[in-house]
């Protein structure tokens, strides 16, 4: 991997960080995620809400069923999962849907949007029992030609999308690119901002930051959401992830940004230590996600901490636990919702393309735009 990156830098000069990440994380053979089937969970590099157990998928399934019913229980509907990893979350969602509502289950098309061949194979193995319902298209073009009611979602997907790194110097922003250092190592190199989309995002965060302030920005949210929105008719989107509203993310005190590497459950900050060998991520600016969705015709339904969001989804499930508690599932619920665990670290944004009034929209807007 390092040879490929060096070759590109020698040929065309320093790489933007999104270009670096496209190889580091998503090179079809050597990228971190291309051979990462076992990298999530106890034996891997990090945990997610999915690796906590099947309850997360069951609660998501309950949210999707509400949307199915609010859409008039259509004769066909579609769920699109992105970043489905080894298919665990899909299996949890599908089992819960089958148990909770056989009619909705029989009308469902479950689409997995997966760019990486190795992950697609793992998903096909894991989901063999659902082979009549689950589709693995190479692109969403066919789905966009025949949009259906339904929802698109992905757990910890947005934080895995490539991002730019920028630094404040002498009262202006510079882009941090990847070049070759004096010791022949991969190293940061600053460059003038020449990408109009990056410049436009920087306008939104302003310039009131101390010298040396370093942070990250994504310009790709709209490009990522657009094909998903086109594949749904008045669809819903749900994106649980770690991140902040813009004002909290780009706070002058957060001087070193949120870029992190993960390997063997240890966090680091140097993305050049092991090209292709570790996860590299940055938090999500949920205000930017909301604005990208609004530009595509959506409204924000909710922006909430995962703990509160899951707790409100779990009402019926919690009632069913009274008198007949499932101790293992209750432990999962605690881990997913407790403010000191995933419930406080993660946020959930719900976006809707369906017209109508929205009960929690004002609260969400206050949290996103202040
Ligand atoms: C942190 S993992 C999350 C895996 C899983 N959802 C979970 O919660 O355990 C992020 C996943 O997003 C996938 N991904 C990144 N960009 C994507 C895209 N444009 N479309 C679909 N999947 C993508 C990566 O391949 C990776 O599998």
Image (cartoon, rainbow, N blue to C red):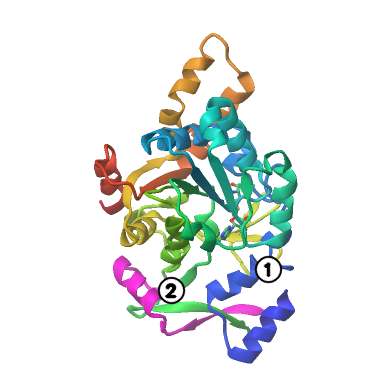
Q: Nearer the viewer, residue 359 or 261?
A: 359
- Residue occupying image coordinates x 41% and y 82%: 193
Residue projecting furthest to the front: 75
Q: Is residue 183 visible?
A: no
Judging depth in this view, the residue of 173 and 312 nearest the camera is 312
In the picture as drawn, the residue positioned furthest to the bottom comes out as 11
Q: Is mark 1 within 8 Å of ligand 1?
A: no
Q: Circle 2 is placed at which residue position?
A: 167
- Disc 1 designates what residue? 273
Q: Nearer the viewer, residue 121 or 199?
A: 121
Which image quarter is the N terminus in? bottom right
Residue 150 % position (x, y): 45, 45
Q: Position of residue 274 (x, y in %)?
A: 70, 67
Report helix, strand or loop for mark 1: loop
How many C-alpha atoms fall within 10 Å of the one at disc 1: few (<14), some, or many (≥20)? Answer: few
- Are dots 1 and 2 in contact, CB under 8 Å? no
Relative height, residue 185 to residue 112 (above, below) = below
Task: Reply yes or no: does residue 196 show up in magenta.
Answer: yes
Of helix, strand and loop, which one carries label 2? strand
Determine which quarter of the picture holds residue 276: bottom right
Q: Give the number of marks.
A: 2
Q: Residue at x 52, y 63 (%)?
A: 141
Magenta-colored span: 184-212
């Amino acid at each position: 991997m390092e040879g490929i990156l060096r070759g590109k830098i020698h040929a065309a000069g320093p790489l933007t960080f999104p270009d670096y990440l496209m190889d580091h994380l998503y090179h079809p053979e050597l990228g971190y995620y291309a051979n990462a089937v076992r990298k999530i969970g106890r034996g891997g590099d990090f945990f997610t809400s999915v690796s906590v157990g099947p309850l997360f998928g069951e609660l998501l399934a309950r949210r999707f069923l509400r949307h199915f019913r609010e859409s008039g229980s259509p004769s066909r509907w579609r769920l699109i999962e992105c970043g489905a990893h080894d298919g665990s979350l899909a299996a949890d969602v599908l089992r819960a849907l089958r148990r909770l509502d056989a009619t909705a289950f029989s009308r469902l098309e479950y689409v997995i949007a997966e760019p990486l061949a190795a992950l697609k194979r793992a998903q096909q193995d894991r989901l063999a029992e659902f082979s009549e319902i689950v589709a693995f298209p190479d692109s969403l073009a066919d789905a966009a030609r025949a949009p259906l009611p339904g929802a698109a979602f992905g757990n910890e997907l947005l934080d895995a999308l490539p991002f730019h790194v920028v630094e404040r110097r002498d009262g202006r922003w510079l882009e941090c690119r990847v070049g070759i250092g004096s010791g022949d190592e991969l190293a940061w190199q600053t460059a003038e901002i020449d990408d109009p989309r990056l410049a436009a995002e920087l306008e939104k965060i302003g310039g009131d930051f101390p010298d040396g302030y370093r942070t990250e920005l994504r310009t790709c949210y709209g490009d990522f959401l657009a094909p998903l929105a086109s594949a749904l008719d008045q669809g819903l989107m749900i994106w649980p992830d770690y991140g902040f509203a813009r004002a909290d993310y780009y706070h002058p005190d957060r001087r070193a940004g949120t870029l992190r590497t993960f390997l063997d459950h240890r966090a680091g900050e140097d993305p050049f230590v092991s090209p292709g060998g570790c996860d590299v991520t940055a938090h999500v600016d949920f205000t930017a996600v909301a604005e990208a969705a609004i530009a595509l015709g959506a409204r924000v339904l909710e922006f909430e901490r995962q703990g509160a969001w899951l707790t409100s989804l779990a009402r019926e499930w919690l009632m069913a636990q009274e008198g007949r508690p499932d101790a293992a599932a209750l432990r999962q619920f605690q881990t997913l919702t407790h403010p000191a665990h995933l419930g406080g670290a993660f946020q959930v944004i719900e976006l809707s393309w369906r017209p109508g009034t929205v009960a929690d929209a004002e609260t969400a807007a206050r949290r996103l735009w202040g």
